[in-house]
Image (tube, rainbow, N blue to C red):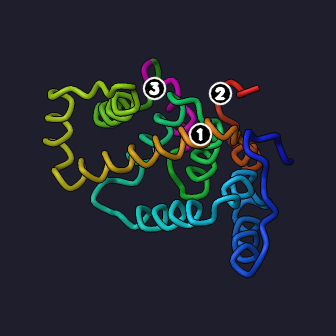
Amino acid sequence: MSRDTRVPQAEITGVYGGLLKKFSKKMFGIVPDGLGVLWNNKPVLKVGLANGRKASKWNACDKDLKSYAHMATSSLIGCSFCLDYGYFMAHNEGLDEAKAREVPRWRVSDVFTSLEREVLEYAEAMSQTPPTVTDELSASLLRQLGAPALVELTAWVAFANQAARMNVALGIESQEFATSCGLPPLKTVASHA
């Protein structure tokens, strides 16, 4: 299901391209449109993939907290691809799916702990332009998580901002990964059209 993106998708070719398509089809069942868009500039694509692999190995901060933070960032920015991917990964990695679905409406939902709420607030505050993170919120998270985890959470949200803002600007939208695994989002993000 290919969609129109703001930058045309390039044909993914070569050995590296073949491996990328094989991996994508194994993981998603399709090659996401975003890969075709980023194939226009392979060095950018390679750095993004390498940074994602490296960041996925970080373990100072709880993975559930980082997942919720990423989805909160994606929802606030309006990246339907990132939000959809977050739901898909929540399902595949055994995260609490009920909580994952509630992230876009975390302020009115009663499923989150106080720590999770602070992490969601932090992710949204970091994602504002300019950021609105307060000393009080940072101090509270520092007490609860410790310095290594707070630094990791901050970097994670920064990466989420980069990915979400790039996807929105390029017109890369949801490909309904979450729907395919029975976890349709509660909230959808407006199309760029």
The extreme top residue here reads 108
Magenta run includes residue 164: no
Q: Which residue position is annotated with label 2?
A: 189
Under mark 2, the amino acid is Val
Q: How far, Cα to Cα, is label 2 from label 1? A: 9 Å
Q: Which residues are magenta?
A: 97-107
Q: Is residue 164 left or right of residue 61?
A: right
- Disc nearer the start of the sequence (2/1): 1
SS at badge 2:
loop
Left or right placement of residue 185 versus residue 148 in this view? right
Residue 29, x across and y down, in percent: 79, 61
Residue appearing at x 27%, y 59% in the figure: 60
> Which residue in the structure is indicated by mark 3?
106
Tell me if residue 69 comes above or below residue 129 in the rendering.
Answer: below
Relative to 43, is 52 on the left or the right? left
Magenta span: predominant SS is helix
- On the image, the x and y values in percent for residue 145 come to 21, 47
Q: Between marks 1 and 3, how big is the CA–CA gap?
A: 14 Å
Image quadrant for the C terminus? top right
Foreground: 14 or 54? 14
- 45 versus 96 height, above or below: below
Q: Counting other residues with Cα less than 10 Å from the Cα at mark 1, is it few (<14), some (14-19), or many (20 or more)?
A: many
Q: CA distance from mark 2 to mark 3?
A: 16 Å
Residue type at mark 3: give it: Trp
- Quadrant position of residue 131: top left
Task: Read off the residue under disc 1.
Answer: 83
